[in-house]
Image (cartoon, grey):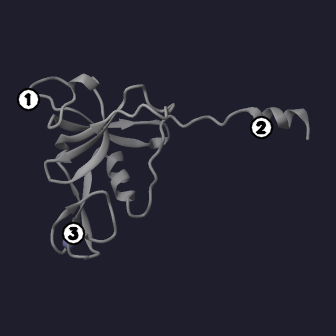
Amino acid sequence: MSGSEWSDMSEAPALPERLAPSMTPDTQFFWDGAKEHRLLTQQCSACNRLRHPPRPMCPVCNALDWEAVEASGRGTVFSFVMPRHPQYPWFEPNYIVALVELEEGVRLVTNLVDVTPADVTIGLPVEVRFDEFAGGLVLPMFRPRRAYGEST
Ligand SMILES: [Zn+2]
């Protein structure tokens, strides 16, 4: 093995700008919707229940048929944590992981942005914001809801 090959091996692979979520055939619609800045949930075609995270079968009536419906993007903070360890290069210190309950009734795990941790409370009204990362990755984030007329 030549010296140049060793030096190649010693170079750490470049980290992606953001840790990408795993995408499967069941979740692809959700990420495709995010690329269009639409927050999609699954709606059972048999009993009309909404569900999230995506899964093939309705947990209420076991039906397999569903449609993607767009949510309002508004919700409230149901629960939140601030992970300390392990530290990841993709996240600034003191990032906030939240469980947001949408107006439509389903909950999703997301990050809170545009807010300091001290200002986060259970029940805080939030709205979706779509953040774009390298490689075409788009992630739905949530920020405190703005009052009507307030500029973004
Ligand atoms: Zn159902």
Of circles 2 and 1, the one toward us is 2
Name the residue that disc number 3 marks.
Answer: 44
- Residue 104 x, y percent position in the rendering: 14, 53
Q: In terms of secondary structure, where does tag 3 sit?
A: strand
Query: Where 108 sits versus 26, above or below?
Result: above
Marker disc for residue 148:
1
Image position, residue 119 (x, y; %): 21, 24
Q: Is residue 81 above or below residue 107?
A: above
Q: Is label 2 within 8 A of ligand 1 (CB to nearest ligand atom)?
A: no
Q: Residue at x 16, y 47 (%)?
A: 72
Q: Is residue 87 left or right of residue 61?
A: right
In the image, residue 130 sits, relative to residue 33, either above or below, namely above
Whether label 3 lies within 8 Å of ligand 1 gets the answer yes
Q: Quadrant of residue 94?
A: top left
> Foreground residue, 79 or 146?
79
Q: Which residue is mark 2?
A: 9
